[in-house]
């Protein structure tokens, strides 16, 4: 059984650029959730995808968008990067319903 | 609105002493509560959830709806318990997790 993987591990961008982060869900999981974790804070829910459809969204602006593919892997896209977008981005996969979420190692994004 | 509060950012206890990490929540419905742990250089992982009523690595947590709390306890701390601990809540029927700010637990030898 393969765990949740994320790429890249680290990323440095400049303000105004766009970024794409990737997540491969754990084998058999059909739901992917994305979280942003700023330094010294707990993870904050961005959105969730279930069977390629957005299934809930947190308090993030539309420049945060996502995709889920038929193999249940997922992308998080952020446009017009701002300095405050610097954070650790976590992906978690699960089965639908009240199932345990399994987290990936995260992507550390730095915006200069 | 759902909210999770962990009042202690840092907690330090000696090996063998009891440990209690506090968690309070705000939610009008029936929440599902979790404790997640992140050991050094490892990913965030589930420690326990209230519906399973399990004891994991000697830790237990009881949901107190009257006090809206879900404190994590262990009677005798071990050095390997040093980690970052996050309390989290999900609303009934939802999968979105609302996390607290976390408590860094350090067990001194």
Image (tube, grey):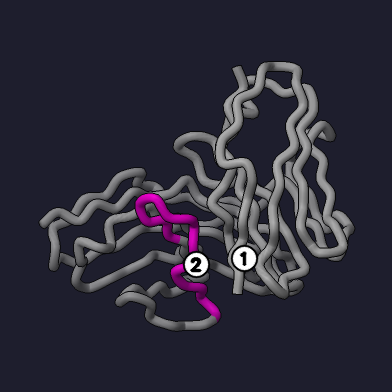
Secondary structure under tag 1 reads loop
* Residue at figure coordinates x 60%, y 75% from the top left: A1
Whether pointer 1 and pointer 2 mark residues with C-beta atoms closer than 8 Å, the reply is yes
C-alpha gap between disc 1 and disc 2: 8 Å
- Image location of residue B16, percent across then percent down: 13, 68
Q: Identify the image quadrant of residue B23.
A: bottom left
Q: Which mark is residue A49?
A: none
Is residue B40 a member of the stretch shown in magenta? yes
- Image location of residue B5, percent across then percent down: 48, 50
* Residue at figure coordinates x 13%, y 58% from the top left: B14
Is residue A32 a member of the stretch shown in magenta? no
Q: Nearer the viewer, residue B44 or B4?
A: B44
Q: Label 1 belongs to which residue?
A: A101
Chain hosting mark 1: A
Judged left or right of residue A21, residue B58 is left
| Residue bounds of the magenta highlight | B37-51
Q: Which mark is residue B46?
A: 2
- Image location of residue B61, percent across then percent down: 40, 72
């Amino acid at each position: 059984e393969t765990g949740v993987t994320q790429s890249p591990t680290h990323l440095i961008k400049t303000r105004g650029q766009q970024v794409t982060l990737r997540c491969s869900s754990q084998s058999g999981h059909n739901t992917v959730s994305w979280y942003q974790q700023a330094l010294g804070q707990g993870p904050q829910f961005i959105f969730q995808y279930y069977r390629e459809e957005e299934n809930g969204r947190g308090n993030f602006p539309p420049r945060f968008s996502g995709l889920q593919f038929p193999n249940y892997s997922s992308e998080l896209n952020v446009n017009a990067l701002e300095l405050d977008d610097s954070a650790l981005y976590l992906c978690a996969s699960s089965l639908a319903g009240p199932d345990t979420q399994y987290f990936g190692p995260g992507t550390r994004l730095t915006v200069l | 609105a759902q909210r999770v509060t962990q009042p202690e950012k840092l907690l330090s206890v000696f090996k063998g002493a009891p440990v209690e990490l506090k968690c309070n929540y705000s939610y009008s419905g029936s929440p599902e509560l979790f404790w997640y742990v992140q050991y050094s250089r490892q990913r965030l992982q589930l420690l326990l959830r209230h519906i399973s009523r399990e004891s994991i690595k000697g830790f237990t947590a009881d949901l107190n709806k009257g006090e809206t709390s879900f404190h994590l306890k262990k009677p005798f701390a071990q050095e390997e318990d040093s980690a970052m601990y996050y309390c989290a809540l999900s609303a009934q029927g939802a999968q979105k997790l609302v996390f607290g700010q976390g408590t860094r637990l350090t067990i001194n030898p």
